[in-house]
Image (cartoon, grey):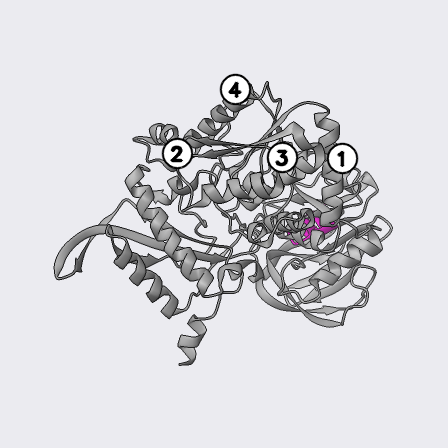
């Protein structure tokens, strides 16, 4: 009985699980150069990513403390860091050894910028090595919960207990702090688990403060931000809205703007933010590509045109998109085809509007990270509004949410007055249902099967009161047919796969432990109500190693 009840409980979000310094599905080290164009606040803390699997979590934790933070690749250059005039700099963890050939190196000029520097894990080892400390391989690595003993609290560990638990993930260790620095803590395999050189404004810890398995981790970051860097903690949704409105007005002037509106929270918040800034200079274009969920097109038009009064053009382009997708089964080809067709539709509508110079998109930070970009970037998958844009794009892009994570976008949406049902709508991919038809062509018939299956899933998830507990819940239709028996007759129907995950920002995710009776009800309805479906399966893969979407 106990085991059955445990399985029926919602899963804990994957971001609560500990990190390991290694390559991640999210491609956290790859940032588009356009992300680095400007911060969202007058003061910020820069996080340089040296390859840590959850380096983006450091930036998230800083933002939660009310300070603007951006994650940049370690090779961005000291000049770029200096140009931003950050209040502080954090060096992330990473999978390499400081002694390995080709390992990321620390530019010593970063230490001389005159701003506080905090090294975490690999970042600490680089600092110690560069400043003359003793770094070498330990007798054994430390992975997971580790006890540390604080011998000198210094500034960084002020107010913390002498004995505490933290999360470690390393093999090399610092045995002696750099000259002029003092050791603050130790662990069984790390003679120096933290050190600081207050005169040079350099601070370092071997463990990960960004995860919940380090109980005093957030206090470390708070001390660094407020007491050491002197950061204000007034970075809020309201401040984001005010600053973006000012920037949009300054950039656009009296020119016209078109927005690609999908009805999802990202494009909706982006559209309303731009509308708040420039009013009637904005026209939203809603393209019904025939790849949306059941009745979604009508809902989007009613909300923006009737409720918000935003200028809106609705384009019925289903036939056009289906023709473009005919014979296409490769997921990247689908994304690029859909992205390119979107742009073509926008360009045509802009011409009808006497010309528009700008295109608004609801691109998020996670989109940019997953789509890759910059030197050495590895593309996990192209998002139609990032990697899928054609080279001959005729618009300048306005992407007011490009440096925000999903939960921050929701907070901005609430600040703008979007109703909860729109703010908390689960993420939906720009290419729509086309990329949830796996291994095959997105035909009208397959889309209809998938649309009906998804409608049943959403109805039951909402009826069970679980919609807000899930990051995403959707169906996948593989290009597979299976044998079944219905009404004493052999059937050869479609397989539908249920995918439901919990997450905070889509960078990591865990599969949701949906109650058995709910799963049974969903499967029974799909098989009973959709004639072409005779089998339902459940995807229990977390991210990593899988992605949330199948393609």
Q: Disc number at residue 392?
A: 4
Give the CA separation, mark 3 to mark 1: 14 Å
Give the percent coordinates (x, y) of residue 512. 45, 62
Residue to which mark 1 is pinned:
246
Residue 334: give its label: 2
Left or right: 242, with 260 as reference point: right
Q: Which region is colored magenta? A: 118-130
Q: CA distance from mark 3 to mark 2?
A: 23 Å
Q: CA distance from mark 4 to mark 1?
A: 29 Å
Q: In terms of sequence position, does the residue under pointer 4 or pointer 1 come before the other? A: 1
Q: Residue at x 30, y 42 (%)?
A: 446
Residue 147: in sight, yes or no?
A: yes
**Residue matched to label 3:** 399
Q: Nearer the viewer, residue 166 or 519?
A: 519
Disc 4 from disc 3: Cα separation: 18 Å
Distance from the alpha carbon under mark 2 to that under mark 4: 19 Å
Q: Residues within 10 Å of mark 2 (few under 14, many from 20)?
A: many
> Which residue is at the far bottom?
1
Q: Nearer the viewer, residue 30 or 455?
A: 455
- Relative horizontal placement of residue 379, taking residue 445 as reference (left or right): right
Residue located 83% across and 53% down the image: 228
Quadrant of image for the C terminus: top left
Labels 3, 1: front one: 1
């Amino acid at each position: 009985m106990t085991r059955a009840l445990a399985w029926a409980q919602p899963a804990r979000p994957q971001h609560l699980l500990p990190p390991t310094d290694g390559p991640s599905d999210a491609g956290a080290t790859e940032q588009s150069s356009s992300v680095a164009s400007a911060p969202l606040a007058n003061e910020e803390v820069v996080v340089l990513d040296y390859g840590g699997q959850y380096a983006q979590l450091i930036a998230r934790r800083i933002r939660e403390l009310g300070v603007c933070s951006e994650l940049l690749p370690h090779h961005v250059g000291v000049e770029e860091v200096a140009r931003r005039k950050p209040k502080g700099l954090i060096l992330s963890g990473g999978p390499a050894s400081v002694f390995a050939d080709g390992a990321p190196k620390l530019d010593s000029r970063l230490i001389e910028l005159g701003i506080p520097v905090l090294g975490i894990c690999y970042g600490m080892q680089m600092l110690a090595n560069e400043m003359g400390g003793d770094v070498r391989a330990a007798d054994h690595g430390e992975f997971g919960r580790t006890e540390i003993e604080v011998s000198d609290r210094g500034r960084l560990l002020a107010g913390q207990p002498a004995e505490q638990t933290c999360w470690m993930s390393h093999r090399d260790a610092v045995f002696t702090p750099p000259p002029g620095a003092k050791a603050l803590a130790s662990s069984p395999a790390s003679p120096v688990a933290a050190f600081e050189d207050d005169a040079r404004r350099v601070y370092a810890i071997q463990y990960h403060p960004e995860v919940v398995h380090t109980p005093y981790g957030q206090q470390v970051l708070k001390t660094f931000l407020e007491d050491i860097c002197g950061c204000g903690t007034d970075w809020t949704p309201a401040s984001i809205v005010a600053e973006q409105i000012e920037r949009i007005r300054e950039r656009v002037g009296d020119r016209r703007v078109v927005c690609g509106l999908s009805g999802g929270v990202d494009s909706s918040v982006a559209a309303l933010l731009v509308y708040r800034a420039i009013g009637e200079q904005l026209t939203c274009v809603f393209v019904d590509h025939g790849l949306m969920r059941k009745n979604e097109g009508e809902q989007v038009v009613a909300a923006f045109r009737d409720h918000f009064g935003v200028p809106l053009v609705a384009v019925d382009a289903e036939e056009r998109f289906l023709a473009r997708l005919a014979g296409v089964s490769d997921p990247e080809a689908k994304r690029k085809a859909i992205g390119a067709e979107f742009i073509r539709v926008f360009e045509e509508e802009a011409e009808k509007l006497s010309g528009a110079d700008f295109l608004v998109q609801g691109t998020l930070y996670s989109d940019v990270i997953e789509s890759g970009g910059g030197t050495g970037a590895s593309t996990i998958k192209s998002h139609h509004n990032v990697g899928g844009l054609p080279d001959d794009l005729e618009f300048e892009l306005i992407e007011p949410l490009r440096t925000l994570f999903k939960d921050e976008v929701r907070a901005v949406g609430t600040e703008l007055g979007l109703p909860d049902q729109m703010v908390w709508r689960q993420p939906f991919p720009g290419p729509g249902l086309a990329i949830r038809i796996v291994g095959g062509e997105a035909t009208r018939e397959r889309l209809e099967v998938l649309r009906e299956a998804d409608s049943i899933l959403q109805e039951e998830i909402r009826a069970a009161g679980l919609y807000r507990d899930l990051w995403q819940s959707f169906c996948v239709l593989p290009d597979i047919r299976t044998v079944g028996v219905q009404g004493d007759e052999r059937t050869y129907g479609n397989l539908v796969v249920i995918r439901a995950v919990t997450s905070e920002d889509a960078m990591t995710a865990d599969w949701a432990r949906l109650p058995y009776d709910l799963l049974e009800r969903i499967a029974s309805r799909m098989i009973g109500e959709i004639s072409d479906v005779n089998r339902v399966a459940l995807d229990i893969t977390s991210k990593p190693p899988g992605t949330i979407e199948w393609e």
